[in-house]
Image (tube, rainbow, N blue to C red):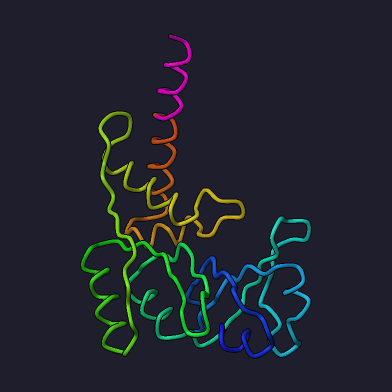
Amino acid sequence: MLKQFASIGLQNLKVVDIRSSKTGEVKHLVELGSEQAKKIPDNLKPVASRKKGEVKPTMWFESEGCEVCNTILSRDAFLVSGKSMEANMIMYSFMVPTFEAYTSIISGLEKTGHKVNVLKMGKFEPKTGILTENQERIFWVALKGGFFDYPRKIGMRELSAKLGIKPATLSETIRRGTRRLLEHHFEKESS
């Protein structure tokens, strides 16, 4: 995708989401400046785009996907962002369900000849207090994956699949966790 964009003079793009599509292609949600959006030729028409009037124009494009995107998606990781830095360099930020998935992504990319430079790595650390550890983990993944963004980057079904739980279970966990957070918030306020 980025090579096609570069060929028409579009550089320094931000990929805000990647997803597998039902057709086997990879869908890329690309954030474009308004001037950049005008340069998109007919042969690269987006699959869909955000509604007019939103702050930054974004468009979904489908392609076969590059090795990097396919490697990330195959390990059930969430893309947080991807930004083209130079001609052949992209900075990715992603979340993985396990440390094994992370090492698998890194080794997979290195085996295919990609130079990988890990700038920062963190891990979920449960906090004691309001939420159960399971609720905290689910809220953390949902927040980082864009579930609470507008528009949502990931829906209930896709998030539940990534977490390995049923959508109804995820919905109930989020509802109960939200209740705990609100009760704690308003309890502090009334004290």
Residue 178 picture location, percent across and down: 44, 35
Residue 36 picture location, percent across and down: 72, 74
- Between 98 and 109, the residue placed more toward the observer is 109
Residue 191 picture location, percent across and down: 43, 9
- Whether residue 4 is situated above or below residue 52 in the rendered picture: below
- Between 97 and 13, the residue placed more toward the observer is 13
Horizontal side of 56 relative to 157 (left or right) equals: right
Identify the residue at horizontal 56%, vertical 88% (top origin). 3
**Main structural element of the magenta stretch: helix, strand or loop?**
helix
Residue 183, by quadrant, is top left
Q: Residue furthest top?
A: 191
Q: How many marks?
A: 0
Q: Which residues are magenta?
A: 181-191
Horizontal side of 50 relative to 182 (left or right) equals: right
Residue 32 picture location, percent across and down: 67, 69
Q: Quadrant of the N terminus?
A: bottom right
Identify the residue at horizontal 39%, vertical 49% (top origin). 170
Does 93 appear in magenta? no
Identify the residue at horizontal 74%, vertical 61% (top origin). 51
Horizontal side of 114 relative to 16 (left or right) equals: left
- Whether residue 25 is situated above or below residue 179 in the rendered picture: below
Residue 161, by quadrant, is bottom left
Identify the residue at horizontal 54%, vertical 65% (top origin). 16
- Whether residue 187 is situated above or below residue 69 in the rendered picture: above
